[in-house]
Image: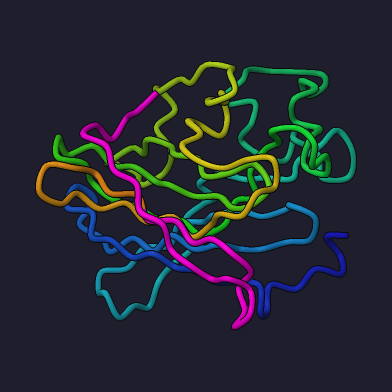
Amino acid sequence: SYASYNIDGNMWAPDVIYNPVMQKWCQYLSVNGDKWHSSIILLTSDQIEGPYEYQAPVVISGFDNGSHSFKDTDVELVLGTMTTLPSRYNTWVNTRILGMPNNIDPCVFYDEEGKLWMAYGSWSGGIFMLELDEETGLRDYDVTYAVSETSDPYFGKKVAGGYYVSGEASYIEYIAGYYFLFVTYGGLEAAGGYQMRVFRSENVDVD
């Protein structure tokens, strides 16, 4: 429950990038909660060493029609006013279907056209990608995404994973004409087959 939740020990995988429009260092940070109730938040600073000041959530997961109400998130800013959630958002605990992401492990980068993106996600729903607003560092609410197996209006475009298969800690970098996607696989332990796999594309916004 919210009352018993403590963020100590539940903040990880920060990614820091300089935003020249904001003239700020932007830190994107995972705040991990129980049972997919996780967020990626934005903190900013004038100096790379900090101190960093909290701004707002970038994307939230684990919301529902109950005690973790979607009404307490920005979901309706994206989907419009609703009395109840579409059924596709009741899928975090069902390992037999594609599912929705657990919002951890942000990777934020500029593409070659100057657009700002964030890749994120993990085992449950896979790796997703959202276009961000260069002026705020938060999601770009003017960019829309379809409902499909590779896209969700709230979470953005799915680029890898799903069905609770291994895959997390995505990282994207442009190198010599290609966007390279690095993803971590395997159990995160010495005997767990821990490995990294690399994918590439000529376009950052892939279908």
| Whole-percent x, y for residue 88 in the image | 74, 25
Seen at 50% across and 40% down, the residue is 160
Total count of labels: 0
In this rendering, the answer to whether 188 lies above or below 178 is below
Instruction: Describe residue 122's horizontal placement relative to residue 64 as left or right.
Output: left
- Does residue 26 sit above or below 7 in this rendering? above
Q: Residue at x 81, y 32 (%)?
A: 90
Q: Is residue 196 above or below residue 111?
A: below
Q: Is residue 18 left or right of residue 129?
A: left
Q: Quadrant of the N terminus?
A: bottom right
**Residue drawn at (15%, 52%), measured in percent from left and top?**
175
Residue drawn 82% across and 19% down? 83
Residue 86 location in percent, x, y? 76, 20
Q: Quadrant of residue 113?
A: top left
Q: Any magenta on residue 148?
A: no
Q: Nearer the viewer, residue 107 or 197?
A: 197
Quarter of the image where the C terminus is located: top left
Magenta span contains residue 186: yes
205 up-or-down from 180: above or below: above
Colour approach in the figure: rainbow
Q: Is residue 90 left or right of residue 27?
A: right
Does 194 sit left or right of 84 as displayed? left
User: Depth check: 135 or 168 in front?
Assistant: 168
Report the span colored magenta. Answer: 182-207
Viewer-proximal residue among 60 and 149: 149
Q: Position of residue 11 (x, y in %)?
A: 59, 71
The location of residue 103, given as percent across then percent down, is 60, 51
Where on the picture, by quarter, is residue 38?
bottom right
